[in-house]
Image (cartoon, rainbow, N blue to C red):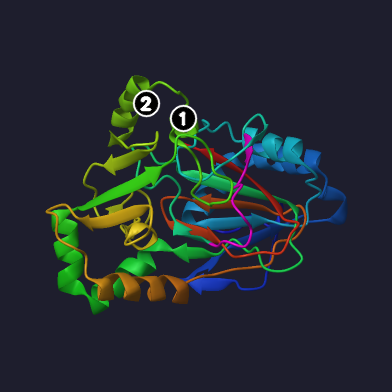
């Protein structure tokens, strides 16, 4: 499939990489300066919806740059132009609602990095698409680095073929501890009442079970979330049969408020986890945010994170099925 240059100009950005023959992220810019307004962009996206969706699957990440996207309202209009169903965020990060489908990305301190992850990787029905909009680029740091997930699997299989298949066969159990109310001093500060949308424990348990987890209540009002055993990798339709590293082992293993171990109760080797962390970093791709950037991610194929940043930084998010 070729890029339709009558609609967009293909650009470049710092940190781009070619992964398995495809540019990541693919940068699409206005064909002409007078076509940079949001109205023209919306018209082009609506006319080329099917093409854009194919490009997103092919390249895994698409960056719209150089368009006059000013605020959450403009960003929301772009998301709604595709007609995708909205996904409700379930996770440990605190987010504030901004406008319709648009939320803040994470209210945790900018001095804390957010580790690489697939959005909502541990719950049933992970969203297929994650979109970011940069309203205020940070003066330093604050990038949203990306990692092609299949490359992590390929390299882990090269170095740990038996261990990968053992973990895959046994499955992984995760736990995550949360307070009852939000703690904005942490990137994982969302309390269980906010996470499950209710202060009622029985209702929270019902909602948790529907998402694939059980709750264990702790003294002081907190809760330990116990996720059902999960696979290490996944293969999704339309993505060249690639085996995605669709798990949270590195992000949750051996942390103060979380754990990851084999479903039979044995530990995942530390060398396995540490080397995986190194590989993920080695495969990372990052660019500096510019005001008005809109980034589309195929959540089935790309891990993303957040580098530490100096304020101010305002990056908003929307997630879709």
Residue 39 lies, in percent from the top left, at 80, 38
Q: Is residue 93 inside the magenta stretch?
A: no
Instruction: Depth check: give the residue in front, 92 or 281.
Output: 92
Determine the residue positioned at 66% across, 73% down: 14
Circle nearer the N terminus (1, 2): 1
Mark 2 burial class by Cα count in 10 Å: few <14, some 14-19, many 20+: some
Mark 1 burial class by Cα count in 10 Å: few <14, some 14-19, many 20+: some
Say what secondary structure mark 1 lies in.
helix
Q: Is residue 165 left or right of residue 88?
A: left
Residue 308 visible in image: yes
| Relative to 152, residue 55 above or below | above
Determine the residue positioned at 88% across, 50% down: 34
Residue 233 visible in image: no
Q: Is residue 37 left or right of residue 308?
A: right
Say what secondary structure mark 2 lies in.
helix
Q: Which residues are magenta?
A: 102-113
Which image quadrant for residue 166? bottom left
Instruction: Depth check: give the residue in front, 24 or 186.
Output: 186
Determine the residue positioned at 48% across, 57% down: 58
| Relative to 2, residue 73 above or below | above
The residue where tag 2 is placed is 204
Mark 1–mark 2 distance (CA, rounded to whole Å): 8 Å
Residue 127 lies, in percent from the top left, at 45, 41
Which image quadrant for residue 215? top left
| Relative to 11, residue 61 above or below | above
The kind of secondary structure the magenta stretch mainly shows is loop
Residue at the right extreme?
34
Determine the residue positioned at 53% across, 39% down: 182
1 and 2 marks in contact (CB < 8 Å): yes
Q: Which mark is residue 193?
A: 1
């Amino acid at each position: 499939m070729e890029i339709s240059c009558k609609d967009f100009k293909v650009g470049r950005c710092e940190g781009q990489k070619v992964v398995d023959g495809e540019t990541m992220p693919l940068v699409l810019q206005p064909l002409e300066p007078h076509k940079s307004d949001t109205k023209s962009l919306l018209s082009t996206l609506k006319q080329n919806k099917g093409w854009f969706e194919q490009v997103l699957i092919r390249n895994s990440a698409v960056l719209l740059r150089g368009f006059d996207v000013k605020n959450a309202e403009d960003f929301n209009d772009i998301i709604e132009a595709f007609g995708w169903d909205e996904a409700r965020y379930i996770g440990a990060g605190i987010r504030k609602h901004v406008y319709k489908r648009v939320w803040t990305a994470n209210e945790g301190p900018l001095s804390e990095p957010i580790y690489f992850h697939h959005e909502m990787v541990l719950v049933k029905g992970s969203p297929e698409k994650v979109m970011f909009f940069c309203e205020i680029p940070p003066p330093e740091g604050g990038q949203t680095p990306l990692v092609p997930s299949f490359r992590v699997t390929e390299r882990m299989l090269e170095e740990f073929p038996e261990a990968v298949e053992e973990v895959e066969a046994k499955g992984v159990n995760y736990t995550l501890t949360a307070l009852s109310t939000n703690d904005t001093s942490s990137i994982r500060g969302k309390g269980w009442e906010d996470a499950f949308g209710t202060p009622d424990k029985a209702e929270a348990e019902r909602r948790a079970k529907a998402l694939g987890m059980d709750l264990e209540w702790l003294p002081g009002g907190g809760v330990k979330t116990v996720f059902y055993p999960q696979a290490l990798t996944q293969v999704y339709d339309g993505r060249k049969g690639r085996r995605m590293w669709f798990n949270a082992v590195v992000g949750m293993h051996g942390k103060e408020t979380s754990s990851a171990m084999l479903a039979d109760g044995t530990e995942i080797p530390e060398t396995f986890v540490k080397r995986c962390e190194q590989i993920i970093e080695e495969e990372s791709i990052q660019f500096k945010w510019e005001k008005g950037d809109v980034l589309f991610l195929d959540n089935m194929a790309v891990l993303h994170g957040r580098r530490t940043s100096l304020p101010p930084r305002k990056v908003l998010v929307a997630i879709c099925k």
